[in-house]
Amino acid sequence: MAKKKKFSNILIDSYVSVSFVGVSLLLVLLDFLVLKGKIGSFLASPLINSVDVGQGANIFNVASVKSYVQMIFYVFAPTSVNILFTDLILILLLGPTLEDRYGITVIGIMIFICALFSGVLNACFCKNSLTGPSCIVYMMIFLNIFFSLIKKKIP
């Protein structure tokens, strides 16, 4: 069971989910107010250099630290506002139950591995860059389904 901490009058029992949503919202506000839509192209996942990659795509550079940062942090890049808010609401709905079941550390590691794995797969096999936390939402949905199937219940 995760430790619950009280900030003023708010009780937080799912640190990873709330932190993830908070960072995403801060980046969206920063992008909207200050950067005028440039953060999405900066944080979009890189692609392997091939003939099929279109103009203006992020090309993965082995010597560049930026490529490695983009490989993981594309989950914070805003896609469209509607899709991003839908994903963040699903993370807030699914995250607390998963954090109670598996713990804060395990969920944090799972989010990191999911972002890295899907970023590498996208770089190797796709023509379009990834942005947004959709892969994390799918991971959380599948974890909830698998946990329910173990208990012999259909979610």
Image (tube, grey):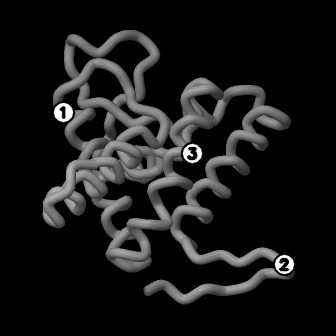
| Amino acid type of the residue that numbered disc 1 sits on in the rendered structure | Cys
Task: Give the residue displayed 21% in from the left and 49% down from the top.
Answer: 154
Residue 1 vertical position relative to residue 63 in the rendered view, above or below: below
Foreground label between 1 and 2? 2
Q: In this view, does 29 lie to the left or right of 40?
A: right
Residue 102 lies, in percent from the top left, at: 33, 76
Residue 32 vertical position relative to residue 68 in the rendered view, above or below: above
Q: Mark 3 or mark 1: which comes first in sequence?
A: 3
Residue 9: mark in rendering: 2
Q: Find disc 3 in the rendering and name its residue.
A: 88
Residue 49 lies, in percent from the top left, at: 25, 26
Foreground label between 3 and 1? 3
How far apart are the two marked residues, 3 and 1, measured between alpha carbons?
Answer: 27 Å
Local crowd size for mark 2, using a 10 Å CA cut-off: few (<14), some (14–19), many (≥20)? few
Q: Find disc 1 in the rendering and name its residue.
A: 124
Residue 38 lies, in percent from the top left, at: 66, 29
Residue 79 lies, in percent from the top left, at: 55, 28
- Determine the secondary structure under disc 3: helix
- Determine the secondary structure under disc 2: loop
How far apart are the two marked residues, 2 and 3, measured between alpha carbons?
Answer: 23 Å
Q: Mark 1 or mark 2: which comes first in sequence?
A: 2
| Amino acid type of the residue that numbered disc 3 sits on in the rendered structure | Leu
Residue 122 sits in quarter? top left
Q: Which of 10 and 24 is in front in this view?
A: 10
Task: Give the residue displayed 56% in from the left and 35% down from the top.
Answer: 86
Residue 146 vertical position relative to residue 4 in the rendered view, above or below: above
- Could you tell me if the residues under marks 2 and 3 are in contact, i.e. CB atoms within 8 Å? no
